[in-house]
Image (cartoon, rainbow, N blue to C red):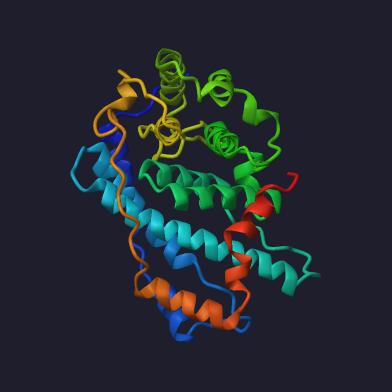
Amino acid sequence: MVSAPSRKQIVSQLRKYTPRTMDRAVAYNRRTDDNSVNAVSWISYSSVGAARQLDALADALEAKGGWADALGGAVAYEMFADQLSFFWHRQFRQEFANSPQPLRLMDWEPMTTTMALGFVLGWREQATYQGYLVAAVLNRDYHLAVGYDERHRRANAFMLRLFANWRSDGTGHAFPLWASSVPVYEQLIERWRTADPGEVQQMLLEACDHHLAEGGPDKKNKYFDFGDDRLARVPLEIIMVLRLREFEGLANPKLDHALMEAPFDTLPRGVAVPAADEYMRGTLARAKTDWPQFESATALETVKAAARAAG
């Protein structure tokens, strides 16, 4: 068992990243990219969104004001990137059905983190879409193998399974046994809707203990549930449970725990979903022009159907 690094250590790591630009999105929008097959471009949104997320989470861990709004801008880009990537993975397998290497580049771990961050921000509609999208990616085998076959992020699997349990509409993915090997997560899947705040408090405090025990940095052949620096001291799965209980009209307990320091000692306020900016509008314009089926292929009902498929 290891202990999670301190907030100060985590913030130092989060601030160390290579700046990203929107150059690829600009080239795509202007049609100056080298793109003979009109592949939809999402890399700029993914990389810039991830960098903004690092800053926003570092601000949160330093209890700085405005972190939630900054996080909203990051999550909006990341959700947009995932939608674009999902479309192109779907389209690639139709356009190049005989390819010996079907496209498989989506990373279900950060996608699930993005979903949970959406719930942290109070984005019920957008986070719900993202949850369906992650399940669809897993069920259609669009995901990177390493994140699924090696790292075994049981907390990410828990959050996606919690989402499926909340929806109760057939959504889900048939994870291997590693996903259900944390007893407190299994208890929460079964009992998170309990009307007894004391019972849910006990489970969540145990989950907080698990979080800190699994917050060590990943090593070459050893992965932790919260080995990603972004999550080591951010109680993402705890806040997701509290937010879903809020959505269900259930009372939430107070959690006195080292993981739940400000600003996470209370359920974060909801923030507005930022409007699409000029980059996003330009990318959508080209994608819809090149691929008239874009809207139907990424519509909620289409994604839900894939999310309900047998995994």
Above or below, comparing residue 199 to residue 90 in the picture: above
Q: Residue furthest right?
A: 98
Q: Residue at x 51, y 31 (%)?
A: 224
Q: Quadrant of residue 265 in the image?
A: top left
Residue 231 visible here: yes
Q: Residue at x 41, y 13 (%)?
A: 198
* Percent x, y of residue 1: 48, 18
Residue 50 visible here: no
* Percent x, y of residue 123: 40, 48
Tell whether 305 sits left or right of 125: right
Q: Residue at x 44, y 26 (%)?
A: 211
Tell whether 136 sits left or right of 83: right
Q: Along the line of sight, which residue is nearer the eye, 179 or 254?
A: 254
Tell whether 54 sits left or right of 262: right
Q: Residue furthest left?
A: 65
Q: Quadrant of the C terminus?
A: top right
Above or below, comparing residue 233 to residue 277 in the picture: above
Above or below, comparing residue 214 to residue 81 in the picture: above
* Percent x, y of residue 202: 43, 14
